[in-house]
Amino acid sequence: MLRSTDNFRSRPLSLWKWGIGVILLALAAGWMPLDCGGQTLKPGTEVFAVEPSRVMELTYRSSTLQLIAHRWEAGGRFTLICLKKGQARPLICPAGANFDQVLRQLTSLRLRRTLPAKEAEDYWRKNPRPDWAEMGIRDNSQLEPFTALIKPVEGSPQEAVVRFGGATYIVELDAKVFQLLAGGCKTLGAGEK
Amino acid sequence: MKRIVVNLEDQTVEAYEGENLVHQFNCVTGDDDHPTDPGTFKIIRKEHPYRSKTYHVQMDYANFFTDDGKALHQYHGPVPLEIVRTLKKGVSEWFGSHGCVRLEEDAARTLYEWAPLGTKVIVQ
């Protein structure tokens, strides 16, 4: 039968590690800065980026449209399922060139400006949830899908606001992307220009 | 051509443009149970900020380079990274990450801004 000291000797590394951990935590507590806010990224940096060829699914849900673009194989052709508000049944169509253009833009969100917390909060208050669309992008990795809220910037046809992970950014995005998405199969389907 | 070299023995990350070393940072890589595997990869996804729902940890300035979610990213732990790095190199692998390459905030942000999607990542 092991005595308590024997038991201690059988696990000295584990106890020792915990001891060091506690000491380091105590030391670190004194060194932690009070303001943990990080610096903002340089304009032009992609706050989100993934190769379009790796994307397997894109979802877009606004107050008037639900769109799912899905494919079974990376690099294959997307099928679109579009349900507009008031429609009884969704339209299903193969994706066309306009969809490729939309996908290229949504998979490279290049920063124009980071909204400071106060400005982001004010913007959110003035533009409540129903004004935003919810976007999801799943790629062929094991990573969780990218999800964000997105809306065009009024009066600025080359910009959108995106909100994810607690950050709110103004990014470069052609307003045409939102017009094409709103059209569903009519604008994004194969054969449409 | 840009490339990132992660040196597992030195626990450093180097960023090259052609043959020129443009950035060098200290890092902490995976522990024995979750090693950062040697090999040649490329950045397949960028996201900032990012929170792992698998490990419930913040991973800001994430440059993902493997399909199972290994990334170069900011270290958010309470103990300074330099201390963790020293302990990992000199005391025990136990102080390593779950396979990601952890960096100080400034280093993670610099690397995130510098490296576009597709940048080669060599782990050696």
Image (spheres, rainbow, N blue to C red):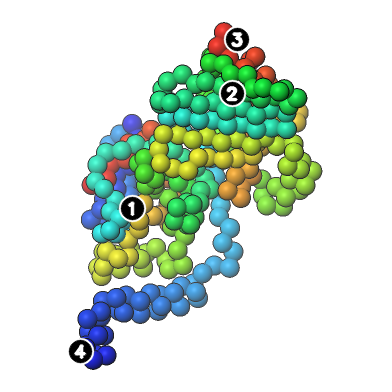
Q: Residue at position x 35%, y 41% from top?
A: B66
Residue A185 is drawn in which quadrant? top right
Residues beneath discs 2 and 3 located on the same chain: yes
Residues beneath discs 2 and 1 located on the same chain: no
Identify the element where label 2 is drawn. strand
Q: Is residue A175 visible?
A: no
Q: Earlier in the sequence, mark 4 or mark 2?
A: 4
In percent of width and height, residue A165 lies at: 58, 48
Residues beneath discs 1 and 4 located on the same chain: no
Q: Residues within 10 Å of mark 4 (few under 14, many from 20)?
A: few
Residue B122 to residue A186: above or below: below
Mark linked to residue B99: 1
Real-space Cα separation, disc 4 to disc 2, in angstroms: 68 Å
In percent of width and height, residue B12 lies at: 30, 53
Q: For mark 4, name the chain.
A: A
Q: Give whichever of A148, A66 is nearer the camera.
A: A66
Which residue position is annotated with label 2? A81
Q: Amino acid at mark 4?
A: Met
In percent of width and height, residue B18 lies at: 30, 34
Residues beneath discs 1 and 3 located on the same chain: no
**Farthest residue in the right direction?**
A126
Residue A185 to residue A14: above or below: above
Q: Residues within 10 Å of mark 2 (few under 14, many from 20)?
A: many
Q: Earlier in the sequence, mark 4 or mark 3?
A: 4
Identify the element where label 3 is drawn. loop
Real-space Cα separation, disc 1 to disc 3, in angstroms: 46 Å
Mark linked to residue A5: none
Q: For mark 3, name the chain.
A: A
Q: Give whichever of B14, A59 is nearer the camera.
A: A59
Which residue position is annotated with label 4? A1
Q: Amino acid at mark 3?
A: Glu
